[in-house]
Image (cartoon, coloured by chain):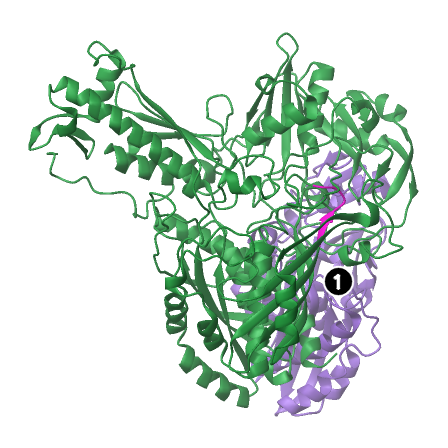
Chain colours: A green, B purple
């Protein structure tokens, strides 16, 4: 390859994911695959009551069983602190009551752990857990966030009067009130965004090993953020130096947010490993995951949207009760505040908007981030209300959207809700493209004809914008988030020219190994196969805040690019020295540094790496090795957008919905790997349409989870997801040098309302204006039959 | 996920299995495909101290189709699903089996295991009622046959006596003018029937001369719909006649209600699915 011959660029190519052969042939290394010598196993005794005082715990029968090593209760662990409440609602008083390692004196949800059995094997531990006798004094329970804050509701925590976690607001109340009071048209709706269970394929757990001689722990954990967990567990829970804990996330079998948080099992495995001097393992089963690991969404909202008869939206007023669950999970308060309220107006220029959110404790599983985290709730709300408004004034919903879109010349756009300005966008082309693919005008004709034959088809539109690349530490600090949100990366070019990237980001299904290697191979001009991407172990990777919020490319990926830039700069200096040329005359291109104008006179990156490593001949003052680290804190978030359209047919006899077409036009900025983007969009849509049609966690009044197994909670199978027609527009982000925005959550953020709008459109002849999710056949049948 | 401790036996003959069952009595459970029993054990809703695994009893497997259909109790759903002659002899059974669970479930689950468990939402009880099958069992007092109509006694309860094992299911193959079908409203998570309707009809000279309809899923046990049958026999089997007859579906039946489908909705769906199964059965009979 000569200097002028361009290496084929990898960025933008749909390479298959390099991590997949291992993961899909059973050669991955997941938490439960790890077996340490002498390892003990934990089974928990969990509360069958949603709310109760613990009167007594008698472990004598369990302790007498062969193979049982110990039984501990919450009171044994009072020497460690509760789990941290890391993200509290900004600017208001919070009443955080995070969980302890094990419950002390009382339980607040079904599944709350009151004791742990440690035994030689998992079977013994489980049998012994059944033999622990716990006496409870049941208390009245409350599961509904709005009822929980009413006078007279059962009080869950002394430290949180009236079960209020926080009361938070954003926007301009007076302006919104005035807009609504003076509007030509106001539509009002109660909108419920039901509780969902994230359901990663791998459940959660942790294994802790303690070395008494050095006082050091190693903890293997199902984690999306091992560096953060290391910090929280040492500095906040155990009060020991951060350096005494090494956290390792092995292969992680999906997270969808549920594995961001610092969980009690991380603490009690550490505590027990130290106490017993042997490694201990805890892995939840699916029932435990459903009962105790975090859930998502669960908002009750009263929304009012004001506008003119000719389709201009003039105001929006939103009052939301956000269910936080029985305890405060790690970032629970950030989700229904910053990530929800501040983007409530979506893709529309709405001059007056106001959001009030009450976070409430209830006797249910903790609620925290789940794919999309706040943005799906916001997007669902505004897109339903816009359709509701369009129906009210008898205008085409596509036209109402066009009339109110933020225009290209408005960017950077400040929505007035305390968010950073939207970076870039061009909303109408994505809408037009989606409608064109759907054949919108033709469909409307066909729809009218079919209605005459008693067939009910509907089309739904969802235009969305979301917040990705969640960062600027300076801004997040002001949002109640008690830390930064930069990312870091180290890039090393070894003596043989092979490149090792270590990143603080952490893939658990996103294909980061592939995407990151594509970037580095292009930037350095080395073969893709020569780039190794390492992650997941706090010993050996630089600090990172973790993978969530669609931020690993726009923040973590950019940190990698900046490290590569530094390497290229050093390589240029070294080349100038070796080629006896002026540094200013050295060009780095296609993996080679050469003298400008004399492309044959040059050194490859491999030659330069070797020269830097053997260090026989370096310029004065240059340190050996091509090894650079960057800490990247972006100036803004990124704001991907797009329009999804779907077409459904409703069976009026049964209420069943058939998804006939699903069209997604997304704009996530530049795409590094379109195949991975496509996969993320598909997966996201599957979860969003599942919210519209199938999923919903249901508690009875006493706090028993009625959807506690996969036989009751309907996660869609491949057969329940339609063919998805994808297309894209590309509006590069000006925020970062890669021009990327993020794609991990867009599908989920866009899709639930897309399906619901289509169903409600199909049901228009029956006078249906709104339906709550999931739109089960029975709900639809009742709506049709006016029941 | 972790069941309580149990002893495990894997007999290779029916005689051996019956002896083991006799020995262990109420403490023992027969393990067939394990798709109902094992989940219950893992959730510790069931904790038998002895499991008698009859998967190695070869004499209980196999399908024979001539004028009569005979299906061994340990025949898997997938073996039934892929049996072309059986699909012709009884389309309702082929319809139903293709809608059970998913491929993995059908590879393990067995017809005998399902019938013995008598889950109120299982598909097969409706089919065996509609085709008027005989359920052959063997126990300490030797073999006997139980008519499907007498087999399902209550929720999760059957006419099986202690110590008895189902050995086979038999019924008459459909002849000319006969048709059957199964229509199902599956639960979105479990794929069990929220309502399932099996229908058999015989058409002679453009008239319905015989008809059997059974509903599963809606109530505590699968039940024949005699009012529907009576209303349809003697008609021409037209869409209107079917709709009028199917309107009697669910009459007198106790309905279940839960978060997935209320009693009211299940009752309405009985009529819809009975109609759909009948229309298909008549189309096949013509």
- Quadrant holding the N terminus of chain A: top left
**Identity of the residue furthest to the top in this view:** A213
Please provide percent x and percent y for residue B241. Answer: 68, 90
Q: Which residues fall within the magenta stretch?
A: A322-328
Where is residue A48, by image quadrant?
top right
Residue located 59% across and 27% down the image = A231
User: With respect to residue A43, does B118 lie above or below?
Assistant: below
What chain letter is assigned to the residue under label 1? B
In the foreground, A60 or A91: A91
Residue located 65% across and 62% down the image = A173
Residue that label 1 marks:
B259
Local SS, label 1: loop
User: Quick check: A585 left or right of A767?
Assistant: left
The answer to whether one can see residue B78 in this image is no
Q: Is residue B195 magenta?
A: no
Please provide percent x and percent y for residue B2. Answer: 72, 36
The answer to whether one can see residue A642 in this image is yes
User: Quick check: A75 left or right of B201?
Assistant: right
- Which class describes the residues within 10 Å of circle 1: few (<14), some (14-19), or many (20+)? few
Please provide percent x and percent y for residue A376. Answer: 57, 57
């Amino acid at each position: 390859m000569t200097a002028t011959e361009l290496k084929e660029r990898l960025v933008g190519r749909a390479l298959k994911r390099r991590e997949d052969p291992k993961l899909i042939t059973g050669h991955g290394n997941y938490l439960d695959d790890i077996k340490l010598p002498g390892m003990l196993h934990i089974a928990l005794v969990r509360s069958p009551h949603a709310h109760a005082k613990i009167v007594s715990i008698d472990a004598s029968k369990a302790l007498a069983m062969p193979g049982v090593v110990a039984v501990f209760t919450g009171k044994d662990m009072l020497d460690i602190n509760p789990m941290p409440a890391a993200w509290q609602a900004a600017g208001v008083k919070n009443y955080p009551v995070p969980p302890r390692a094990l419950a002390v004196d009382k339980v607040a949800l079904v599944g709350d752990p009151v004791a742990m059995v440690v035994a030689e094997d998992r079977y013994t531990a489980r049998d012994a857990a059944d033999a622990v006798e716990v006496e409870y004094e049941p208390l009245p329970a409350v599961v509904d966030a709005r009822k929980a804050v009413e006078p007279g509701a059962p009080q869950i925590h002394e430290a949180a009067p009236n079960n209020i976690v926080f009361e938070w607001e954003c926007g301009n109340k007076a302006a919104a009130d005035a807009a609504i009071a003076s509007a030509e048209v106001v539509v009002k709706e109660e909108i419920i965004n039901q509780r969902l269970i994230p359901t990663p394929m791998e459940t959660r757990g942790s294994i802790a090993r303690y070395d008494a001689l050095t006082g050091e722990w190693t903890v293997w954990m199902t984690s999306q953020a091992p560096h953060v967990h290391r910090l929280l567990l040492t500095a906040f829970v155990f009060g020991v130096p951060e350096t005494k804990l090494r956290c390792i996330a092995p292969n992680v079998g999906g997270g969808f947010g549920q594995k961001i948080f610092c969980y009690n099992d991380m603490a009690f495995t550490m505590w027990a490993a130290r106490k017993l001097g042997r490694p201990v393992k805890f892995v939840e089963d699916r029932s435990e995951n459903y009962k105790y690991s975090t859930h998502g969404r669960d908002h009750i909202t009263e929304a009012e949207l004001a506008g003119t008869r000719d389709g201009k939206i003039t105001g929006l007023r939103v009052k939301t009760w956000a269910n936080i669950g029985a305890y405060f999970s790690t970032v629970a308060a950030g989700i229904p505040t910053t990530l929800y309220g501040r983007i409530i107006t979506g893709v529309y220029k709405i001059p007056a908007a106001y959001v009030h959110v009450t976070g409430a404790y209830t006797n249910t599983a903790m609620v925290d981030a789940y794919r999309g985290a706040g943005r799906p709730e916001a997007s669902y709300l505004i897109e339903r209300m816009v359709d509701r408004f369009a129906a009210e004034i008898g205008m085409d919903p596509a036209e109402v959207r066009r009339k109110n879109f933020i225009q290209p010349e408005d960017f950077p756009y400040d929505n007035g809700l305390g968010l950073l300005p939207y970076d870039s966008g061009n909303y109408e082309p994505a809408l037009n493209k989606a409608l064109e693919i759907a054949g919108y005008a033709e469909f409307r004709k066909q729809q009218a004809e079919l209605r005459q034959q008693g067939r009910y088809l509907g089309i739904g539109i969802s235009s969305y914008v979301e917040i990705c690349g969640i960062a600027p530490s300076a801004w997040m600090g002001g949002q109640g988030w008690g830390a930064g949100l930069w990312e870091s990366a180290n890039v090393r070019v070894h003596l043989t020219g092979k490149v090792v990237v270590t990143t603080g980001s952490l893939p658990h299904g996103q294909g980061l190994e592939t995407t990151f290697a594509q970037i580095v191979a292009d930037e350095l001009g080395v073969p893709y196969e020569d780039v190794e991407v390492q992650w997941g172990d706090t010993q050996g990777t630089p600090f990172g805040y973790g993978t969530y919020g669609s931020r690993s490319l726009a923040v973590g990926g950019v940190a990698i690019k900046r490290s590569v830039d530094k390497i290229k700069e050093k390589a240029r200096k070294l080349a100038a020295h070796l080629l006896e040329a002026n540094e200013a005359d050295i060009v780095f291109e296609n993996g080679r540094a050469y003298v400008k104008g004399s492309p044959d006179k040059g050194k490859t990156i491999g030659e330069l790496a070797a020269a830097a490593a053997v260090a026989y001949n370096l310029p004065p003052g240059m340190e050996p090795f091509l090894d650079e680290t960057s800490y990247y804190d972006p100036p803004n978030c990124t704001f991907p957008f797009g329009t999804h359209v779907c077409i459904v047919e409703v069976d009026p006899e049964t209420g069943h919905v058939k998804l006939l077409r699903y069209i997604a036009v997304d704009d996530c900025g530049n795409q590094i790997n379109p195949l991975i983007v496509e996969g993320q969009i598909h997966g996201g849509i599957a979860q969003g349409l599942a919210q519209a049609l199938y999923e919903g966690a249901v508690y009875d009044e006493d706090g028993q989870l009625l959807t506690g197994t996969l036989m009751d909670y309907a996660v869609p199978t491949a057969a329940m997801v339609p063919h998805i027609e994808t297309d894209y527009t590309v509006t590069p982000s000006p925020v970062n040098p890669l021009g990327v925005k993020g794609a991990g959550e867009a599908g989920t953020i866009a899709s639930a309302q897309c399906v619901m709008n289509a169903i409600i459109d199909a049901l228009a002849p029956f006078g249906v204006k709104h339906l709550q999710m999931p739109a089960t056949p029975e709900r639809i049948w009742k709506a049709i039959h006016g029941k | 996920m972790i069941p309580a401790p149990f002893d495990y036996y894997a007999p290779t003959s029916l005689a051996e299995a019956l002896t083991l069952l006799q020995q262990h009595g109420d403490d023992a459970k027969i393990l067939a495909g394990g798709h109902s029993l094992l989940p219950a054990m893992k959730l510790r809703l069931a904790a038998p101290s002895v499991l008698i695994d009859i998967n190695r009893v070869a004499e209980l497997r196999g399908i024979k189709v001539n004028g009569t259909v005979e299906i061994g109790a340990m025949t898997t759903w997938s073996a039934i699903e892929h049996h072309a002659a059986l699909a012709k002899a009884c389309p309702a059974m082929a319809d139903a089996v293709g809608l059970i669970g998913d491929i993995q479930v059908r590879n393990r689950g067995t017809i005998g295991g399902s019938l013995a468990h008598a889950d109120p939402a299982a598909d097969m009880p409706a089919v065996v009622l509609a085709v008027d099958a005989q359920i052959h069992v063997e126990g300490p007092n030797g073999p006997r046959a139980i008519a499907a109509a007498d087999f399902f006694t209550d929720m999760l309860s059957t006419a099986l006596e202690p110590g008895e094992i189902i050995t086979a299911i038999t019924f008459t193959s459909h002849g000319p003018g006969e048709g059957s079908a199964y229509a199902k409203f599956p639960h979105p998570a479990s794929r069990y029937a929220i309502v399932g309707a099996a229908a058999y009809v015989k058409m002679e000279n453009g008239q319905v001369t015989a008809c059997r309809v059974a509903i599963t899923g809606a109530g505590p046990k699968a039940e024949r719909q005699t009012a529907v049958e009576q209303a349809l026999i003697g008609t021409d089997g037209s869409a209107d006649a079917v709709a009028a007859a199917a309107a009697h579906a669910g009459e007198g039946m106790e309905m279940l209600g839960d978060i997935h489908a209320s009693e009211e909705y299940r009752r309405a769906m009985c009529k819809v699915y009975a109609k759909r199964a009948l229309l298909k059965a008549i189309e096949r009979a013509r």
